[in-house]
Amino acid sequence: LEEKIISLEGRVPKTYPDVNFLNYLKRKRILITGGAGFVGSHLVDRLMLDGHEILVVDNFFTGRKRNVEHWIGHENFELIHHDIVNPLFIEVDEIYHLASPASPPHYMHNPVKTIKTNTLGTINILGLARRLNAKILIASTSEVYGDPDIHPQPETYWGHVNPIGPRACYDEGKRVSETLTYAYAKQENMQVRVARIFNTYGPRMHMNDGRVVSNFILQALQNDVITVYGSGEQTRSFQYVSDLVEGMISLMNSNYSQPVNLGNPVEHTINEFASIIKNLVGGHSKIIHVSEVEDDPQRRRPNITRAKTYLNWEPKVDLNTGLHKTVEYFRQELKRFKYTHRI
Ligand code: NAD
Ligand code: UDP
C-alpha cells in the first residue's frame, strides 16, 4: 500500500486513509473509443459514476459532444478528437472499443471507411492494448450471424453473411475485428472480451440514423406514415441501452474470453413493432409497406444462455418501459430541433 501511495504522489486525496481512499486505489483509467456515440455515452456515464477516470476518443462521425457535455470540465474526464484509423498513443488500464458506425444508413454511407475503421482501427486499438497490457472489450454485433439459418442464435453459430452485399462492409468488418482480437489474444497472450450486441435502443439515439426504432417513433410523433420495409414479417429483438451497459461491464469484469451475446430475447415482427409504437405514441399515422431492403436478415433473436451462465446477466427493462423513455427523448429532440430551426 505504501508503495502505491508513494507512486501516486500528489494525486492522493485528502480523505486518506478512509474508505474513499481504498475506492480511489481501485479506480481505473479507462479508454472508450466511440464514447461520444449512443451506447458509448451511456457507458461513460456509468463508469464515471463508479469513480473511474475516463478517456473518450471519437471522430464525431455519428457521435456528438452533446452526448458527453455534462462531463466536460470534470477532473476525471477527457475527450479526444481522433480518428482510430490513425495510431493513438495514450496510457490506460482498460479499453472498451466501440468506435464504428452502427446503423445501416450510416455504415453504408462510406463502406470503405467502415471497413477501415473496423480493420485498421481495431488493429490500432489492439496494438495499444498490447503495448499497455490492458484488458480490451470489443463491441461486436449480431450482424456477424448475417441472415441466420439457426434460430435463436447461439455464439457457436458461424453465421450466414453475404461477403459482397451492401451490409458486408459492416458485417465482414466486425467479423475481421473478432478474428483480429482472437489472433492478438493467442499470439500476444492478451486478455480480451467480445460482446456480440443485438439491436439496442434508448435516449441519445441519433435522430436520423434510419434505424427502425428512431424511424417509427419519429414518424408516429409527427403523424407521418410508418414505413415497414418489405412484408414486415422479419423479426428483431430489442434491448434497452442500460441493460447493454450492465452486460458490457459484467463481461469486462468476468474471466470469460469467448464471445458473448448481449441482447433481449423477446422477439417481435416488424409489423408488430409498428403497431406497438403507433399505440404507444397515439396520433393518426398510417402503417404502410414499402420495398424491402437488400439482404435484410429475416430473423434475429439472441440465445443468452452464455451471458446468464458466465456473467449472471439478463436484461431487466421490458419493451414498454424502455420505449416510454425513448419516445419522451425523441419528443424533446423534436422540440429542440423546431426551436433551433425556428420551425
Ligand atoms: P454510434 O454511431 O452512436 O456510435 C459510434 C461512435 O463511434 C460515434 O460516436 C462515432 O463518431 C464513433 N466513430 C465512428 N468511426 C470512428 C473512427 N474511425 N474513429 C473514431 N471514432 C469513430 O453507434 P452505437 O449504436 O453507439 O454503437 C456503438 C458500438 O456498438 C458500435 O461498434 C456498433 O457496431 C456496436 N453495436 C451497436 C448496436 C446497436 O444496436 N446500437 C448493435 C450491435 C453493435
Ligand atoms: N425497418 C423498417 N422500416 C424502417 C427502418 C427499418 O421496416 O423505417 C426494418 C428493417 O428492414 C429491418 C428492421 O426494421 O428488418 C431493423 O432495421 P434496423 O435498420 O433498425 O437494424 P438492423 O437490425 O437491420 O441492423
Image (spheres, rainbow, N blue to C red):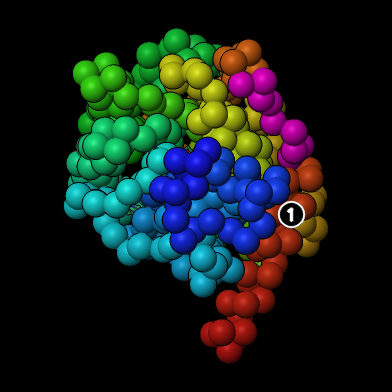
Q: Residue at x 37, y 46 (%)?
A: 92
Q: Secondary structure at mark 1?
A: helix
Along the line of sight, which residue is nearer the eye, 326 or 126? 126
What type of secondary structure mainly makes up the magenta span? Answer: loop
Q: As displayed, is residue 78 above or below residue 171?
A: below
- Magenta residue span: 311-319
Q: Residue at x 41, y 48 (%)?
A: 7
The answer to which image quadrant residue 204 occupies is bottom right
Q: Residue at x 68, y 62 (%)?
A: 329
- Residue under label 1: 325
Residue 330, image x and y in percent? 65, 63
Quarter of the picture containing the C terminus is: bottom right
Instruction: Report the amino acid beneath label 1.
Output: Lys
The answer to which image quadrant residue 320 occupies is top right
Residue 79 lies in the magenta-colored region: no
Q: Residue at x 62, y 61 (%)?
A: 14
Visible residue check, residue 212: no
Along the line of sight, which residue is nearer the eye, 18 or 36? 18
Residue 174, image x and y in percent? 33, 33
Residue 308, image x and y in percent? 65, 18
Q: As displayed, is residue 306 above or below residue 147?
A: above
The number of numbered discs placed on residues in the rendered structure image is 1
